[in-house]
């Protein structure tokens, strides 16, 4: 069995194709900018940030046995991310995400995570076959789980004996997929990381502030919820109380991956033994550095 201190990152590992422009954009805009292709996906973004903080993340995902997949595996290994447990599919292509960002934020994005969805519970085999755990000896460490998995698989995870001992940290892939996390609201060891809009989808109502949203999620059954709101207050709520902090003011140069950076930095801070307030501020500082462009992508 693997070291119980190993942090597992389960979900999307793919190529991010991102077009960025400093210009303010709207639907139909045609402006000059830069287009990049970099390793991405929620699970991979979290893993890369964990690695920057000196932790040793392992990936549980699917990556195709195609040219793009081989290159992605090579890039992950170069970043010292453990890929031994990745499910390599013979017939499913490597997934891809495409986004357009302007000076006014994210304009549009499309996530093609169909291979991850099609692979289903095959990506979880190491947690069941004794490699990382089993039903009789479930994995006892931190698991970062992203909402790119299907609703059926997330529902299975919520009830599975394979996850009963884990410190489960959960993030939606996007506001449009936030409701997939509903089965995990009542998981006794789950911490949800969402933005205010995503919290609204989960609670089926709008919120004025992140603290209001975080408290509502706890009232709906979440043991713990961290809710961000851009540059406004961020909240960490549990049944035992609410902590609120304000992000540092920075010039925003990118947004894709900011939430993943926040989540990973928060996990890293708590892994180092920091208290809730210190960990929350450390995560906000890391996310601010990321969106300002100070952290390499």
Image (cartoon, helix red, strand yellow):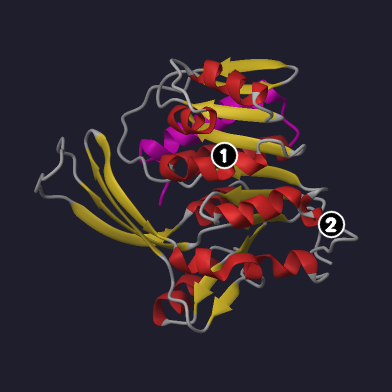
Q: Position of residue 108 (x, y in %)?
A: 27, 46
Task: Determine if the magenta segment contains residue 281.
Answer: yes
Mark 2 neighbour density, 10 Å: few (under 14) some (14–19) many (20 or more): some
Tags 1 and 2 in contact by the CB under 8 Å rule?
Answer: no
Image-based side of 110 in relation to 166, left or right: left
Q: Is residue 6 left or right of residue 154?
A: right
For disc 2, the marked residue is 138
Q: How far apart are marks 1 and 2 (CA)?
A: 23 Å
User: Which residue range is magenta in the image?
Assistant: 272-297
Judged left or right of residue 39, residue 11 is: right
Residue 244, horizontal then vertical, whole percent: 57, 16
Residue 110: which quarter of the image? bottom left
The residue sitting at the right extreme is 136
Residue 55 visible in the shown view? no
- The percent position of residue 253, horizontal first and vertical second, equals 30, 38
Crowd class of label 1 (few under 14; some 14 to 19; many from 20; radius 10 Å)? many
At 73% from the left and 69% from the top, the residue drawn is: 126
Q: Residue at coordinates 44% horizontally, 72% vertically from top-left?
A: 94
In the image, what residue occupies the spot 33% across and 41% down? 254
Give SS at disc 1: helix
Q: Mark 1 points at which residue?
A: 263
Secondary structure at badge 2 equals loop
Relative to 234, residue 67 above or below: below
- Nearest to the observer: residue 257 or residue 198: 198
């Amino acid at each position: 069995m693997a070291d119980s201190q190993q942090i597992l990152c389960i979900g999307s590992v793919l190529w991010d194709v991102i077009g960025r422009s400093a210009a303010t954009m709207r639907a139909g805009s045609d402006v000059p900018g830069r287009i990049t292709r970099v390793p991405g996906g929620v699970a991979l973004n979290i893993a890369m940030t964990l690695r920057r903080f000196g932790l040793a993340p392992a990936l549980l995902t699917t990556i195709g046995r195609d040219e793009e997949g081989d290159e992605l595996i090579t890039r992950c290994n170069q970043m010292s991310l453990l890929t031994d447990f990745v499910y390599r599919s013979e017939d499913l292509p490597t997934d891809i995400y495409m986004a357009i960002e302007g000076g006014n934020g994210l304009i549009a994005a499309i996530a093609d995570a169909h291979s991850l969805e099609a692979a289903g519970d095959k990506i979880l085999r190491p947690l069941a076959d004794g490699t990382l755990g089993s039903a009789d000896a479930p994995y006892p460490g931190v698991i970062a789980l992203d909402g790119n998995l299907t609703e059926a698989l997330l529902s299975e995870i919520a009830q599975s004996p394979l996850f009963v001992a884990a410190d489960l940290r959960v993030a939606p892939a996007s506001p449009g997929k936030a409701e997939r996390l509903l089965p995990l609201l009542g998981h006794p060891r789950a911490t949800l990381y969402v933005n205010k809009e995503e919290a609204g989808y989960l609670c089926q109502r709008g919120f004025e502030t992140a603290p209001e949203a975080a408290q509502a999620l706890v009232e709906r059954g979440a043991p713990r919820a961290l809710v961000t709101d851009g540059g406004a207050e961020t909240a960490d709520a549990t049944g035992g109380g609410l902590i609120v902090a304000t992000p540092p003011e920075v010039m925003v140069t990118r947004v894709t991956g900011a939430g993943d950076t926040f989540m990973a930095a928060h996990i890293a801070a708590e892994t180092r033994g920091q208290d809730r307030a210190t960990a929350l501020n450390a995560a906000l500082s890391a996310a601010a550095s990321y969106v300002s462009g100070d952290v390499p992508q």
